[in-house]
């Protein structure tokens, strides 16, 4: 595992800032112990510094994973968040969408969120902003990007897309072999 380069750090932090905004500082400066981002092959891991120090004793070729996988870099250099980062993103999310029970299964199968399935939406959510999708009982289901702002989404018909799907917890079953 190695530290991220400046370009890699910029790509990761820009993507995370789209979802959690200024709360990004809470990921790095934690009260319990310091955490950092490390790169292993093309995947970015969020790991405590104490665990990272312990991992030095394991050979690079033998180390498969350490900490929480936040995402991976594509061959073109773009960073894509994985669903494994949902627990951290949901804690610090700036904008949230709650979907009704009849909209949970379509979202968990990888479909976009339509207006008919939206239960609540954070006020003043701008267009093309990263949001965390919750069930009505406040269980994080995934994340996506808003198709319309809060004000514009009120005027839409029930079949219009409000949130574009990015990742959902159903990926643990659908894409099990590629997540880790």
Image: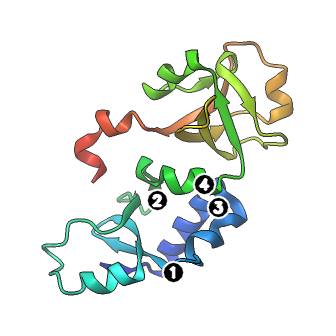
Of the image marks 1 and 3, the number of the one nearer the N terminus: 1
Q: Nearer the viewer, mark 4 or mark 1?
A: 4
Q: What residue appears at the point 74 percent right and 29 percent down from the top-left corner?
A: 120
Q: Nearer the viewer, mark 2 or mark 3?
A: 3
Q: How many marks?
A: 4
- Is residue 122 found left or right of 161 in the rendered image? right
Residue at mark 2 to residue at mark 4: CA–CA distance: 21 Å
Q: Residues within 10 Å of mark 1 (few under 14, many from 20)?
A: few
Q: Residues within 10 Å of mark 4 (few under 14, many from 20)?
A: few
Q: Label 2, on which residue?
A: 79
Quarter of the image containing the C terminus?
bottom left
- Is residue 1 found left or right of 77 in the rendered image? left
Q: Nearer the viewer, mark 2 or mark 4?
A: 4
- Is residue 71 found left or right of 151 in the rendered image? left
- Is residue 8 found left or right of 98 in the rendered image? left
Which disc number belongs to residue 6? 1
- The x, y position of residue 107, in whole percent, is 51, 26
Which disc number belongs to residue 152? none
Of the image marks 3 and 4, the number of the one nearer the N terminus: 3
Q: Label 4, on which residue?
A: 91
Q: What residue appears at the point 27 percent right and 68 percent down from the top-left corner?
A: 41
């Amino acid at each position: 595992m190695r530290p991220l380069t400046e370009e890699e750090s910029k790509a990761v932090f820009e993507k995370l800032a789209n979802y959690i905004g200024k709360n990004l500082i809470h990921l790095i400066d934690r009260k319990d112990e310091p955490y950092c981002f490390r790169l292993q092959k093309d995947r970015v891991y969020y790991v405590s510094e104490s665990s990272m120090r312990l991992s030095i004793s394991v050979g690079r070729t033998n180390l498969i994973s350490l900490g929480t996988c936040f995402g991976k870099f594509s061959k073109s250099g773009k960073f894509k968040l994985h669903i494994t980062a949902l627990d951290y993103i949901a804690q610090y999310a700036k904008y949230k969408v709650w979907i009704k029970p009849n909209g949970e299964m379509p979202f968990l199968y990888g479909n976009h969120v339509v207006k008919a399935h939206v239960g609540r939406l954070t006020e003043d959510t701008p267009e093309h902003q990263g949001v965390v999708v919750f069930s009505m009982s406040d269980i994080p289901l995934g994340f996506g990007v808003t198709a319309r702002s809060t004000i514009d989404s009120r005027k839409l018909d029930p079949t219009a897309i409000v949130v574009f799907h990015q990742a959902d917890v159903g990926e643990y079953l659908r894409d099990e072999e590629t997540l880790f």
